[in-house]
Image (spheres, rainbow, N blue to C red):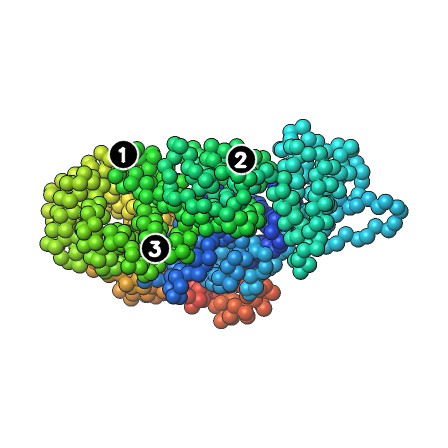
Amino acid sequence: MTATTVPHNLPAEPNDFIGRERDLAELRQLLGATRAVTLCGPGGIGKTRLALRVAATLADGCPDGVWFAGLGELAPAERAGNGNGAGPDPVVRRVTAALGITDEPGRPLDETLATALRGRDMLLVLDNCEHLIDACARFCQILLADCPRVRILATSREPLRVRGENVWRVPPLATPAAVPVVPAVPAAPTAATPSVPASGGAEELSRSEAVRLFVARASSARPSFTLADDNAAAVADLCRALDGVPLAIELAAARTRVLSVEEITRRLRDRFRLLSAGDRTAPARQRTLRGTIDWSHDLLDEPERVLFRRLSIFAGQWTLDQAERVCADEPPDDLPDAGPRGETGADTGGRRLAADDVLDLLTALVDKSLVVVGAEVEGETRFRMLDSIRAYAGDRLADARETEDLGRRHRDVVLAAAEDDAEVALAERPASWAVRVGLFLRYDTELDNVRAALAWSYEHGEVEAGLRLCTALRTYCIPRGYFAECEHWTDRFLASAPAGVRPGVRGAALVGRAQLAVGRREFGKAARCAAEGLPLCRDAGDTVMTAAALDLLGQTDLRAGRPDEAAARFDEAIEIAHAGGDRWNEGLALISRGALLALGGRLRDAQQSYEAGLRLMREVDQLWGAGRALIGLGQLAQVRGDGAAAIAYYEEALPGLRMIDAGPEIARCLSGIGRVAIDQGDVGRARQALAGSLLRSRDHGMRLGVARGLEAFAELMVMEGAPAAAVRLGGAAAALREAIGQSPIAGARQERMLAPIRKELGDHVVAQLWGEGRDMSPDAAVSLALARPAVAPDGPSGVSGTSGPVTPPSTLTRREREIAALIARGLSNKGIADELVISPATVARHVTNILTKLGFGSRAQIAAWAVRQDGRPG
């Protein structure tokens, strides 16, 4: 894949990309001229591989990166949503997860996503949209309308049919033209199957993309294989028989390990003949592809077939360990049993699949290109199936009447691992921080299996298992700030919990739900869930979740202005956790009590409580918990006016937090460093730290963090000699706080910033600038904050009577200055398009760029600015 330095999450290509040079060139050109392209074609034609290559080659032209969201693994329960019309759309959930955007309370996730992407210049790849075609169409339409610099590259077996979509049919690879047996006028190649001139020689045949692909893959399967004059005709015949379908060619090439090309071709033709009487309404290449997989499956021995179909139960990737646990009829001797092994309807020739046989069988399936070896994660190799092969194997699993049993086995293995990992993460079992970091990295690749297990539990009414899985997963979701999906599933299971669910399981799930609510600052919701879950956990003797519930209730009491009640809750949580040897919850409660004491002005006591919590977190080697204590100590040092100590605490917390990408805490650390640097007059350090905090808050959809970041940048802009920009940022932050229902910044703090600016610019100008800031979009405000101020201060001469440009006019391109002049003449986007002979969409994109660069929020401001440029903005 093309090397790039821009951010992305594109999967690594498993092998060399062969051919399609013309396709790549056309798609790059098309995506340069339009914002939505859908690659359409049958399964196995290479849509995903082509999309990934196109995205990689375009990466350097996308400042905000290229991002991949796979939709092919969504289970039916995921596609259905909450069942009552509530909850985020599954496509939106997948995209926000891929981008690492955090949802926020009281706001639909699609709005949060659109807001987060509105100012980004990026490419989004949506893969396998056919499973959710309507939802994908709705999502793309919203994104195209609200995010003018986001481009979409989708793959689907059918078009999305949205306004502005360009459908690009992925063709088969070019195959050699057949050599006529008797002289004749050659038939023209069809549009569906391009061809190159025929020749019996290997050199000329190697011009064919299909032949090149076959040779490359056959050489990997059998290193001694080469294309020569004596096998060239057979290779050409085989590629033609496979219609140039990449997946079919790769499967055939794998057989060169044991068969000659002539033998492969003979077998393949026999199989096609048998399938020719099948579904006549299906496209020919689709029938061919199924015939190819049928043929490949028929070459397997019986144990290989059993493992092949059973592996289809995995969604996404799996490890050898997981394959042994799920697919064997008996778990391996050195692995604990994940759950009961039910009888299946499989005919395995009188043999049961033993765990000790899985490695050799899996290796055979890899050799035969039915399983793909993926990346190595935390010392374990991951495996996967291509979508078409997995679907075929899933049909075989259903035919063998094993789907139900394998689904339960899969869920049991996922649940057992999640609960085991949660104990490690929360220090109920000893482990190093490196091991805990590895859990986070592993779950990044495990999410598809987790979602499948949740969906299976919900579809089969196994609510207790679903609640247990949700409770375990919160340990992964909360530090990352990934709340939406865990909340979604927890709420579904809680709403449908039957009377048979054990009270302790329900209680733990309610406390876990309260923790998610605190992470999203929904303290009312947290209080209700924790209050309901606390007695259930007490009665069940679950001291871990009892202590957690008490800590949560203390936090909600503190937010509600009930410090005495909060203190009692924290003290009881500490006592229960300490008695049970639960140092994790004891440490968290000590940190919470430190915050309570600090708010009460008892700084020395607060210091001791934070340090006690920090000591416990270090003893169990839990650096995320230690990071929370260090942040509290840093804030305490700021209150005392000890900036050096504050920065030292924040910087000590950052390395551990960055290891697991704990977004909310990282943003808090960087914000603290930036504010201390402002107090110390260190402008460069302040800008660097605040920029990191602001960008992380924006990219994760944390609007309160964005508002706080803009307020900090307003103070910084005053120091940098940009008072007009400072006032605009203050206005933008105030408007954002109002929009999300948060209290405004303290009046005294705000006045300290504004008072000297009023003396310099005058009340009238400050009021006007504040209003302009309130009219700015959050993205425009972030762009203004991150733009370094001009060398000369933007004082009264730049804003007298009306606001001046925040950035020099030279930042606009010639075309943008031309459009600004036409806006000043009163032309609409359509009028400007007609005047310049460009599309209205292009005009809209330029207008958005002008607003962002000048820090404006309306066309009227652009017009006023253009008039002030000596009447000659163009």
The residue drawn where x is 38% and y is 35% is 335
The residue drawn where x is 84% and y is 46% is 180
Residue under numbered circle 3: 463
| Amino acid tagged 1 | Pro
Q: Is residue 614 visible?
A: no
Label 3, residues with CA under 10 Å away: few <14, some 14-19, many ≥20: many
Q: Earlier in the sequence, mark 1 or mark 3?
A: 1
Q: Is residue 107 visible?
A: yes
In this rendering, position of residue 184 left or right of residue 763: right
Label 2, residues with CA under 10 Å away: few <14, some 14-19, many ≥20: many
Tag 1–tag 3 contact (CB < 8 Å): no
Residue under numbered circle 1: 430
| Amino acid tagged 2 | Leu
Label 1, residues with CA under 10 Å away: few <14, some 14-19, many ≥20: some
Residue under numbered circle 2: 361
Residue 361 location in percent, x, y? 53, 35
Tag 2–tag 3 contact (CB < 8 Å): no
Q: Give the quarter of the image for residue 86.
A: bottom left
**SS class, disc 1:** loop
Most foreground residue, 155 or 766: 155
| Amino acid tagged 3 | Val
